Amino acid sequence: MTHAIDVLAATPPQLLPARELMAFTLASHILLVPFGVALPFLTLLMHHRGLRRGDEAALRLARRWSAVMAVQFAIGIVTGTVLSFEFGLLWPGMMGRWGDVFGLAFGIEAWAFFLEAVLLAVYLYGWRTLRPWPHFWVGVPLCASALLGAFGIIAANSWMNTPRGFTLDASGRPASVDVRRAIFTPIFGPEYWHFLGAAYMTAAYCVAGVYAVGLLRGRRDRYHRLGFTVPFTVAAVLTPVQFMLGDSLARAVFHKQPVKFSAMEIVWRTGTHVPEYMFGRLHSDGSISGGIKIPQLDSILAGFSPATKVPGLTAVPADTRPTAAQATLVHWAFDIMVTLGSLLILLALWYGWSWLRRRDLPRSRWFLRCAAVAGAACLVCVECGWVTTEVGRQPWIVYQHMRVSEAVTGTHAYGLWTMLGIVVVVYAGAFAAFLTVVRKMSARWREADAGGDVVPEGPESDIPYGPRALSRVGGGGPAHPTPDHRTPPPGNGAGG
């Protein structure tokens, strides 16, 4: 205990603002990541349907989703760039010592980012300049580049959780780096697949939620039904799969990061027949208040047997484990994620049962209400997942090799608080701009679908692979199409 007090007393004053700044930027950026990873796939899925079936509504949806994807990518550039600089500015101790070991993972992410930017530009431009099927195939590597970017980020994070691929020289610095082992760490696979499942689920539920709101408001046309059913079907199929992936990741944490698992389950003392607590609060003396206690369940979940020994937080010294407050935060984040995931499984089963019986959506408006908020629930789960991952590792920034306090910058705390204020303002402006642009695009599309007198400006308002309409000039005569000698796919006539 005395040693732990000495460590806390030696904590540099700039550590708190540095952590708050990193936490804010990461929590903000992570809201956009699922769309950057999964929206290209959803767009290509709708695009393929439109081409294969000659479906004008599907092509219109794909084109509009690609426009939203471009806006999201632009905002992600702002939030992601700030986050990238913060690794070097806020944590020079980590990057200076360990950058040669896991820096390639960040290089992969940066390379994928630039590749994605180029492919996205070509894909957007291709709606008017490429033939339909070649244009579709241009979008396929766009999905692959998004997966590659996620690969780089998760490789870096999994290395911080289970560092491998190096030896230490006499001075304690890494040497003899094995890049392959540094990237493919023991927890990389479970973490990567769980993250991809979360990204695809979140993006699919959020997109479906937009059209669920439209259905609730009486827009029962095929455009809204298609915009809802395709992404919601993807999300419904992935939901139980994601639950199993999460269980696999939790078990990997049990074996590779037992202290983090103890924090997730607020286990104080090592033992068998350990109960599971749903919520509850851990106190510094090891007692737990509140919550729902389920006897022996924690041991069963960890090792499929009540006799499974689960390590407690007291198995390691106090200065090498999360505090009681941090453990409670991790535990609540984990339980919220599991609870919301369980509710989403029920929603997916509701949808699946109705579809199998009637080949139609559930008729209850409560289903659409639940579907409308499912995307927000997924975003909460994403935030909770990262809280579990990052806070559960404390006090280590590189698990069992470097503490957060050893990696922090020497910049004065006042400067970091000032930087945090500036970043909050910039991010608030960026997200406000994102919502404003998307709302204006949505309003223009509704006007176009309603057959307004004025053709909305902008290429995304035109029918894909059809003649481009020019906006009316001076309130005069009719719009004139530009020459376009490509033949649209069957059934892709004028409209909207």
Image (cartoon, grey):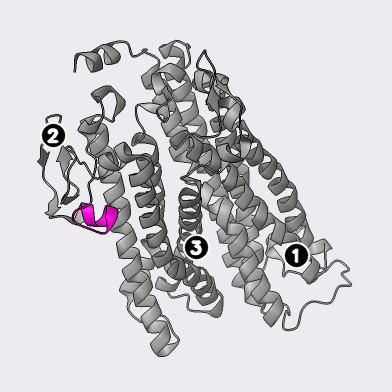
Point 30% across, 43% down: residue: 261
CA gap, disc 1 to disc 2?
Answer: 58 Å
What residue did someone put label 1 on?
137
Give the residue drawn at x 64%, y 75%.
Answer: 49
Q: Amino acid at mark 3?
A: Ala
Quadrant in the picture for residue 347: bottom left
Q: Amino acid at mark 1?
A: Trp
Q: Which residues are magenta?
A: 299-307
Question: Where residue 480 sits: x, y (%)?
Answer: 83, 68
Closest to the observer, 184 or 389: 184
Mark 2, residues whose alpha carbon is within 10 Å: few (<14), some, or many (≥20)? some
For numbered disc 2, what is the local secondary structure? loop
> For mark 1, does the 10 Å Cα neighbourhood hold few (<14), some (14 to 19), or many (20 or more) residues?
few
Q: Is residue 423 visible?
A: yes
- The x and y percentages for residue 257 are 36, 39
Disc 3 designates what residue? 204
- Name the quadrant of the C terminus: bottom right
Q: Is residue 472 visible in this depiction of the protein?
A: no
Q: Earlier in the sequence, mark 1 or mark 2?
A: 1
Relative horizontal placement of residue 283, taking residue 327 as reference (left or right) = left
371, 283: nearer the viewer:
283
Is 312 located above or below residue 416 in the figure? Answer: below
> Closer to the camera: disc 1 or disc 2?
2
User: Splitting the image into 4 quarters, where does residue 418 fall?
Assistant: top left
Image check: 183 left or right of 277? right
Q: Residue at x 24, y 17 (%)?
A: 4
- Judged by depth in the image, the label closer to the viewer, 2 or 3, is 2
